[in-house]
Image: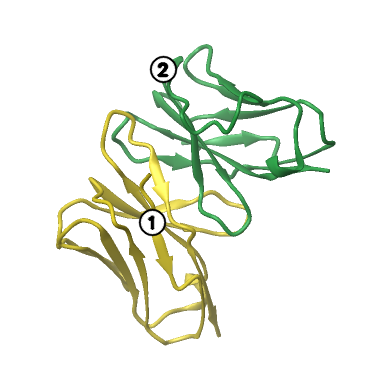
Amino acid sequence: GAGVSQTPSNKVTEKGKYVELRCDPISGHTALYWYRQSLGQGPEFLIYFQGTGAADDSGLPNDRFFAVRPEGSVSTLKIQRTERGDSAVYLCASSAGHSETQYFGPGTRLLVL
Amino acid sequence: TQLLEQSPQFLSIQEGENLTVYCNSSSVFSSLQWYRQEPGEGPVLLVTVVTGGEVKKLKRLTFQFGDARKDSSLHITAAQPGDTGLYLCAGDGGGSNYKLTFGKGTLLTVNP
């Protein structure tokens, strides 16, 4: 079956612009996670959804970052007023339940100029 | 804040050599996972260890979880160029959301 997909695979934007990153989880997976991986670092947790609700958003760095999952499937990570420091790979993972194996997508590489 | 430290950060070896990478923390984890990540891809789970002292083998890879569940090691026997990649350890601190705390990774290069 299809794995986790993320679009776009690459995104180049200018400082101050707004961007949306999309994640399509594995069908039927109720849990969805967003992580951010900066160059030379491991992924860092941003937010966790169980169904439609954000159960834990403690990893979001500030209020410029927001994520939604309105129908409990696809999720969108939204970044307002992008800054150069937001440049990173944004990874999405989904799992069948909150304690099950997380399957990662290929990531979206965001570059803020 | 739970932190995982991996060592070495970089490792370049010849095909056929053995190697060990380490993942250490001052915190106790409910479980610890090892992932491999290739360029342009997301991390792929290799193994999950749960019990202190547990040893798991996956072909030429041997994973060990420390008795106190604070550290882990990955040993590769007779490394091959296909083993090249970024090896990440990640800990689950327990609780209700299973969010993972990752180390910075060990970038392994196996030269033919």
Q: Is residue B98 above or below residue B60?
A: above
Secondary structure state at the residue bearing disc 2? loop
The disc label shown at residue B4, or none: 1
- Tell me which amino acid carries mark 2: Gly
**Number of labelled discs?**
2
Secondary structure state at the residue bearing disc 1? loop
Q: Is residue A91 above or below residue A77?
A: below
- Taking the image as shown, residue A93 lies to the left or right of residue A102, namely right
Name of the residue lying farthest toward the top: A71
State the residue position of label 2.
Answer: A51
Residue at point 28%, 28% (across, down): B96
Quadrant where the image shows the N terminus of chain B: top left
The disc label shown at residue A30, or none: none
**x and y percentages locating residue A110 in the rendered image:** 71, 41
In whole angstroms, how far apart are the C-alphas of marks 1 and 2? 29 Å
Residue at point 66%, 25% (across, down): A64
- Taking the image as shown, residue A59 lies to the left or right of residue A65, namely left
Neighbour class for label 2 at 10 Å: few (<14), some, many (≥20)?
A: some
Which chain wears green?
Answer: A
Q: Is residue B43 above or below residue A27?
A: below
Quadrant where the image shows the C terminus of chain B: bottom right
Residue at point 23%, 45% (across, down): B30
Give the letter of the chain under mark 1.
B
For chain B, the rendered hue is yellow
Of residues A44 and A90, the one drawn nearer to the viewer in this rendering: A44
Display colour scheme: by chain
**x and y percentages locating residue B103 in the rendered image:** 44, 56
Of residues B3 and B10, the one drawn nearer to the viewer in this rendering: B3
**x and y percentages locating residue A108 in the rendered image:** 65, 41
- Taking the image as shown, residue A112 lies to the left or right of residue A67, namely right
Neighbour class for label 1 at 10 Å: few (<14), some, many (≥20)?
A: many
- Tell me which amino acid carries mark 1: Leu
